[in-house]
Every structure is written in structure tokens, then in C-alpha cells.
Amino acid sequence: MSKLSQSRFYQSIRLPSLVILILWIIQGFQMFTGLNLGWLGVYPRHEVGIKGIFLSPFIHSQDVMHLINNSVPLFVGLAMILFFYERVAARAIILIYLLTGLGVWLFGRTVLHIGASGVIYGLISFIFWNGVFRRNIKSIVLALIILMLYSGMFLGVLPNQPGISWESHLIGAIVGILVYFIFRQQLESDEATMNEEDEPLHIQNSDEDFFLDRDTFEKPKSQRNQNQSDWFSDSTF
């Protein structure tokens, strides 16, 4: 790995590491104080729940497994976008973060929604659909990695799962597609290079390069016959 790639790698894991650290500090605060911060979650269509659009991804249930299950995919999703989609990463992550919370506030059930799983679904969806639609080698490989690691997450969008904010999952997945669509024209530097290399060369061929007369394929038979007649009439022997 080159020094430039190493630098990008370390930068791409810095923010995810900080986010995970903050989540665990908040979780530790809940566990040691016994306070439940669930009231900071999204409460749909009520003014009191608006703050959850910004705060709910940082709040998890006091059952530590909730945060354990979210920590790894959140770290992976953030790091992959920051490293491989550097040009749009900051804007994409902010949009996924805010639009997912807003969508839950608008359309979710009237219960408190907490946790980063909606944002995770948005990040994973963004990476996956980039691979489906961009169809360059990098994006396809990333989509396949996501599919292998987190294919089971697709079941999380199914409704009527007790104790699970399936609306957050579904809305996050939809937001990921929407954010891809917003940035679909903004190529990364490596993608622009690949597109330039893939452009076909336009080679001008002379008639001498062809075994058969080009008229054989480019003109109808009647016109070829007329040309032959004109040639014979104009020729001297």
C-alpha cells in the first residue's frame, strides 16, 4: 500500500472510530448511572420527538447487545464510504443521517425509535446500489462484500418485528438509494481515470485495409450494381 493510500486509510477510520467511541461512552453512562436516555429518540409526528432526528442514532437500549450488534456494521459502512467514495463521503453520510431520522419522524409508528441501525441500513444501501448501478470493478466488489457480510440484514426491513424499529431499517435503505441517486454523476478520481482508459480508439481505416469492398456491406445491391455499370462505362481497356 502506498503512503497516499495509507494516509487515506487512516483518515477513513478516524471518524468511524470516534463515532463508535462516543456511542460506547454514552452506553457506559447509561449502564453505570442507571439512567435510560431513550427519551432522546425519535417520537414520530410530535414536537418532542424532533430532537431524535439528531440524537437517536447515539442512543441504544440498556441491553448492551443492541450496541454490540450495531458497532461493527456502522464502523465498516462509514469507513468504506470515506475511503472509496471520498469525493461525496461527507455529504452522503450527513444526508443519510438526517434523512433517515426525518423519515422515521414522518412515517414511523408512534413509539420511541432509538439506535444507529437506520443509519447503518442507509450506509449499506448506498454502497450496495453504487455497485449495482455504477458497475465499475471497485463498486461491484464493494457491493459483493456488503452482500456477503450483511445479506441477513435485508430481513430487518420486514414489518411487525417486536422490539425492532423496522421502519428505521426500511427508511434507511430507501434513503441510501436516494442519496446514491443524488450523487450518481459525481465520479471519484479513480473512476474518472478508468472511464478515460475505457474509451474506444477511433481508427480511420483506408479502403486498402478491407479484404472486400466496403460497398458490399454499406450499400444496397441495386446501388452497387449501378456503381459497377458506371465503372465499366468510364473504363478504357
Image (tube, rainbow, N blue to C red):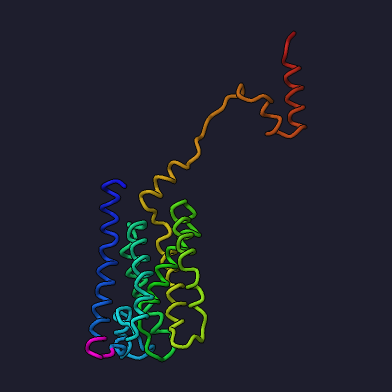
Residue at x 28% of width, y 51% of height: 6
Chain part drawn in magenta? 31-36
Residue at x 47% of width, y 73% of height: 153
Q: Is residue 147 left or right of residue 208?
A: left
Asked whether 21 falls inside the magenta stretch, the response is no
Q: Quadrant of residue 64?
A: bottom left
Residue at x 27% of width, y 81% of height: 27
On screen, 155 above or below 43? Answer: above
On screen, 7 above or below 229? Answer: below
- Which corner quadrant holds the C terminus? top right
Residue 174: x and y in percent read 46, 73
On screen, 176 above or below 37? Answer: above
Q: Which of 33 and 145 lies nearest the eye of the viewer? A: 33
Q: Which of 228 and 185 lies nearest the eye of the viewer? A: 185
Residue 146: x and y in percent read 45, 63
Q: Which of 142 and 134 lies nearest the eye of the viewer? A: 142
Q: How many marks?
A: 0
Residue 53: x and y in percent read 33, 81
Q: Quadrant of residue 220?
A: top right
Residue at x 23% of width, y 84% of height: 29
On screen, 85 above or below 36? Answer: above
View extreme (top): residue: 237
Residue 38: x and y in percent read 31, 88
